[in-house]
Image: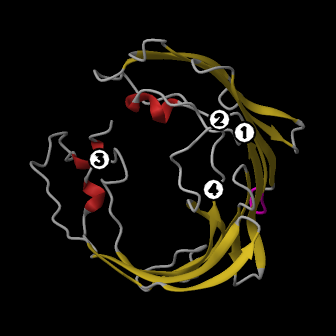
Amino acid sequence: DVCSPILTEAGRLRGDRTRETVQFQAELGTRLSRVFNLHWGRLRQVQHVIEPQVRYFYVPAVDHQEDFPLYDSLDRINRRNLFVYGFSNRVLGKFTVAPEAGATSQPSAATEVRELARFSVMNAYDSSRYIVRGKERFSDLDINGRLSPLPYTTFTFDSTYDVARSDVTMARLGASLSDPRPLPATAPLLEHLQRRTTLGVSYRTITDRILKEMNGYAILRLNEYVTGAYFGRYDFNAKSFIGNRYYLRFISPQNCWYVDLGLIDKVNPNEFEFRFLITFVGLSSSSRSAF
């Protein structure tokens, strides 16, 4: 069945089929910044950064692509004459670092730089085709914001704004709180496996799909070797949970292997999965990490 698009009426293949095409991409951007001296407690300086950028993507039209079987997104490459443009605002803070208890070698003037806020707006225009509801060459505005006033708190905002209809088609608000204590030193190959105890929640609404849902997660670090996690989705229209995932990670005391266990309860499709992954550090892995 998958080969039927390239069969003749007699049921025989038409022979070798090829598609020659080319893709061209370019990006242009700059960076403007200014530093303000504040000296508010541990906050010594604030840097405001503005980063405008423009990206261009071109793909020519190639005929007779419908003769190819459709397996993935690379089988039918639509023409593009796309411009993506926008800007990002970032606010960075430089803080003095308090010396650790009992430390004698840490310099008194040690500092750290941390991103405090980020705000970006992006848009796109395609002169070769309509990209919104078959009648608009301009895309919707993508608006993103992130606020991190403290190292262990984060607030996020994502929105899609339809300029033609003057309406917000998607919006998401989120917040997270994590354990501020530093993670203990571990083997270099296992550093990316360590997780802080973290709680997070977000609310998302999509106007066209009449979607209203709450997403929440909790990562609980029990000790250096055991970490558990829960991820859940709640649908306000159905007034029920539409997905629950439970994970457990165990890292061996020898730091040479770790095990991930997962239980996944889905509603659409209605199925229940159990996942087991064991990875020998430095050798190989059968799949990507469950977390």
Amino acid type shown at disc 3: Pro
Which numbered tag is attached to residue 69?
3
Q: Could you tell me which residue is drawn at 65 percent across and 76 percent down?
A: 46
User: Residue 224: x and y, percent?
Assistant: 59, 21
Question: How far across and how far down the image is residue 43, in percent?
Answer: 70, 68
Q: Quadrant of residue 147?
A: bottom right
164 in relation to 272, above or below: below
> For the N terminus, which image quadrant?
top left
- Using a 10 Å C-alpha cutoff, classify the residue at mark 2 as few (fewer than 14 neighbours), some (14 to 19) or many (20 or more): some
Task: Between residue 89 and residue 5, name the one nearer to us.
Answer: 89
Distance in Å between CA atoms under marks 3 and 2: 46 Å
Marks 3 and 4, how far apart in space? 59 Å
Whether residue 142 appears in this view of the structure is: no
On whether residue 208 falls in the magenta region, the answer is yes
275 within the magenta span: no
* Mark 1 vs 2, N-terminal side: 1
Distance from Cα at disc 4 to Cα at disc 1:
18 Å
Residue 48 in the image: x percent, y percent?
Answer: 61, 81
Residue position for label 1: 179
**Residue tagged 2:** 196
Q: Is residue 255 above or below residue 206?
A: above
Q: Are marks 1 and 2 in contact (CB under 8 Å)?
A: yes
Which secondary structure lies at badge 1? loop
Q: In this rendering, which labeled residue sits more in front, label 3 or label 2?
A: 2
Q: Residue at x 81, y 32 (%)?
A: 241
Q: Give the range drawn in magenta.
A: 205-209
The amino acid marked with disc number 2 is Arg
Q: Where is residue 85 in the image (x, y as percent from the top left)?
A: 49, 82
Q: Mark 4 points at which residue?
A: 97
Q: Residue at x 19, y 47 (%)?
A: 8
